[in-house]
Amino acid sequence: MKTCTCCKMIKEVSEFGNDKQKADGKYPDCKVCRNKNVKLRNKYRKLYPKPDRCDCCGLVTNDLHVDHDHEDDSFRGYLCPSCNHGIGKL
């Protein structure tokens, strides 16, 4: 059994996708939440054009990620990997 970091539900390990980079070999969020978040990020990419710099620190980069609030699914902006990981850990 494993708890999804997104929906907080306890589910069977088989309900989590494989991720070789994780210690347990599974993504921290379940397949259902993962699919929902992918669809939401794709929607935001269409609605909000990607800028050339991070909305948090201002770093100019091509590697920007869609940031959204997991509680109400609102769009927060585009973040560089460092800001995205930092906010995720908070």
Image: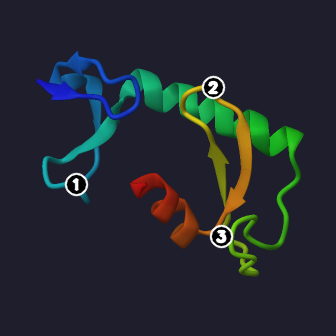
Which residue is label 1 attached to?
22
Q: Give the alpha-carbon distance from disc 2 to disc 3, as whole Å.
A: 25 Å
Secondary structure, mark 1, is loop
Q: Image point 67% across, 64% down: which residue?
A: 64
Q: Give the alpha-carbon distance from disc 2 to disc 1, as whole Å.
A: 27 Å
Q: Image point 67% across, 39% down: which residue?
A: 41
Which residue is label 3 attached to?
63
Q: Image point 51% across, 28% down: which residue?
A: 35
Earlier along the polypeptide chain: callout 3 or callout 1? Answer: 1
Q: Image point 46% across, 53% down: which residue?
A: 88
Front residue (pair 39, 86): 86
Earlier along the polypeptide chain: callout 2 or callout 3? Answer: 3
Q: Residue 79 lies in what quarter of the image?
A: bottom right
Q: CB of mark 3 within 8 Å of CB of mark 1?
A: no
Residue type pointed to by label 1 = Lys
Image position, residue 43 (x, y; %): 76, 33
Q: Is residue 86 left or right of residue 25?
A: right
Q: Is residue 34 left or right of residue 40?
A: left
Report how many numbered discs are placed on residues in the image: 3
Q: Which mark is residue 72?
A: 2
Q: Which mark is residue 73?
A: none
Image position, residue 75 (x, y; %): 73, 40
The image shows residue 45, relative to residue 33, as above or below, that is below
Residue type pointed to by label 2 = Asp
Q: Give the alpha-carbon distance from disc 3 to disc 1, as whole Å.
A: 22 Å
